Image (cartoon, grey):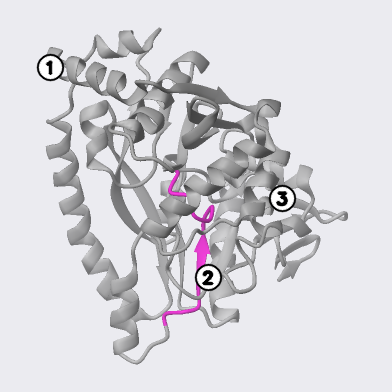
């Protein structure tokens, strides 16, 4: 589509677009919409042919030089895996009624249940243009629907104004209320919870050395070890890992300064690890794994070490990923997250809209109930 010196088109990959122009739109706060992250997935084969995630970024180019003016990280999907917002029931219902739910358009950072911008635009008008373009892409390529997952809170209104259906869910995030140390955070908890966390940490760390690695300190052998951990977790949770081994090498080469790898060593050998990404004001916990099961070690590496790192770096919060009510008793509080959905078929759209109205009420009630059971001292 074009109008004068403005052109809206789809690209074959994020890697086919200029790095500097993409990152000027993406900003520096969220690592998962950066050119480096998205192209590491493309170049490693984690997305692309054979994966069910075919890159199809939608872009707006403007001016005589066709400068990148807005962009949307989007993918044609042939399944619903790796999204963390489940629409399997919608797909089943539509296909029982004779429709074809797949392929669909997914606007997301692949395999990443972390909030962030999905409309990389400097103005609301350009954001609205991207949303209309996504709908046009669905019509052009016979896609049933478009789905934007884990949208940044300040972009929710843009999707609502565009007529997309809104879906809510709950994650557990840790908020830094000006703590100067982990003990300062513990001081905000009830005495019983404070003691329980101290016991957990002592038990988890017994006989181990825990190291925080970032930048040049992350060596190839550290990635080799973490790949082993990641494969074990992926095999147990998803059947097969989403990321290839090459993805970790490329992430280390392209954005090591935005990565925090926490490893637990038993002597000279790492036995477990947690991979985090460093944002502008948030530490994002992504993957964890181990080759030896140790009591409470998952909590220590993924949650408590993340809190330590966030306090040390002056970050405002930790997003520790999807699900996990066990995070609540460890100081992570229930937070509403949002996704947006555009569905072409009027019948399916009406049915999903009705379903979402009831689901949002239930999610709001759950969040309220969970909020009454945090470990913080009253007042």
Reading the chain from its start, which is encountered first: label 3 or label 1?
A: 3
Q: Which mark is residue 135?
A: 2
Q: Is residue 349 above or below residue 147?
A: below
Tell me how far mark 1 sits from mark 2, CA to CA: 52 Å
Reading the chain from its start, which is encountered first: label 1 or label 2?
A: 2
Which of these two is toward me, 113 or 72? 113
Residue 236 on the magenta span: no
Q: Are marks 1 and 2 in contact (CB under 8 Å)?
A: no
Reading the chain from its start, which is encountered first: label 3 or label 2?
A: 3
Image quadrant assignment for residue 261: top right
> For the residue carrying disc 1, how many other residues have a C-alpha within 10 Å: few (<14), some (14-19), or many (20+)?
few
Q: Secondary structure at mark 2?
A: helix
> For the residue carrying disc 2, how many other residues have a C-alpha within 10 Å: few (<14), some (14-19), or many (20+)?
some
Query: Label 1 belongs to which residue?
Result: 192
Q: Secondary structure at mark 3?
A: strand
Tell me how far mark 3 sits from mark 2, CA to CA: 19 Å
Which of these two is toward me, 95 or 354? 95
Image quadrant assignment for residue 9: bottom right
Q: Is residue 3 above or below residue 373?
A: below
**In this view of the protein, can residue 96 be seen by the observer?**
yes
Query: Label 3 belongs to which residue?
Result: 69
Which of these two is toward me, 271 or 135? 271
Measured as percent of width and height from the top left, residue 34 is found at 64, 44
Q: Residue at the spot x=66%, y=26% of the render?
A: 217
Range of the magenta residues? 101-114
Measured as percent of width and height from the top left, residue 167 is found at 32, 56
Tell me how far mark 3 sits from mark 1, CA to CA: 53 Å
Q: Secondary structure at mark 1?
A: helix
Of labels 3 and 1, the one closer to you: 1
Measured as percent of width and height from the top left, residue 303 is found at 36, 30
Q: Residue furthest front?
A: 267
């Amino acid at each position: 589509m074009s109008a004068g010196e403005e052109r809206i088109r789809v690209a074959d990959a994020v890697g086919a677009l200029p790095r500097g122009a993409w990152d000027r739109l993406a900003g520096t706060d969220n690592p998962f919409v950066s050119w480096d992250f998205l192209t590491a997935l493309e170049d490693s084969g984690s997305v692309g042919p054979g994966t069910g995630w075919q890159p199809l970024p939608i872009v707006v180019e403007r001016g005589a030089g066709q400068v990148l003016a807005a962009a949307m990280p989007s993918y044609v999907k042939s399944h619903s895996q790796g999204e963390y917002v489940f629409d399997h029931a919608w797909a089943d219902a539509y296909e029982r009624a004779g429709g074809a739910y797949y392929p669909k358009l997914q606007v997301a950072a692949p395999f990443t249940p972390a909030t962030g911008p999905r409309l990389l635009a400097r103005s609301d008008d350009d954001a609205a243009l991207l949303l209309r373009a996504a709908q046009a892409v669905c019509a052009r390529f016979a896609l049933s629907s478009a789905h934007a997952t884990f949208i940044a809170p300040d972009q929710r209104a843009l999707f609502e104004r565009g007529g997309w259906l809104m879906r809510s869910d709950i994650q557990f995030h840790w908020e830094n209320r000006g703590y100067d140390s982990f003990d300062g955070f513990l001081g905000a908890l009830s005495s019983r919870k404070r003691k329980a966390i101290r016991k957990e940490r002592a038990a988890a760390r017994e006989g181990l050395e825990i190291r925080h690695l970032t930048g040049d300190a992350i060596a190839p052998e550290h990635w080799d070890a973490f790949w082993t951990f990641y494969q074990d977790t992926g095999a147990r949770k998803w059947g097969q890992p989403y990321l290839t081994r090459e993805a970790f090498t490329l992430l280390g080469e392209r954005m090591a300064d935005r990565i925090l790898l926490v490893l637990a060593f038993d002597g000279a050998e790492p036995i477990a690890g947690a991979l985090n990404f460093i944002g502008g004001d948030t530490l994002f916990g992504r993957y964890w794994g181990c080759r030896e099961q140790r009591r409470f070690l998952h909590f220590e590496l993924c949650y408590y070490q993340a809190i330590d790192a966030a306090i040390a770096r002056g970050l405002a919060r930790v997003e520790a990923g999807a699900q996990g009510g066990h995070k609540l008793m460890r100081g992570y509080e229930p937070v509403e997250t949002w996704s947006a959905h555009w569905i072409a078929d009027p019948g399916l759209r009406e049915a999903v809209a009705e379903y979402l109205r009831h689901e949002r009420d239930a999610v709001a009630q759950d969040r309220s109930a969970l909020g009454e059971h945090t470990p913080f001292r009253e007042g």
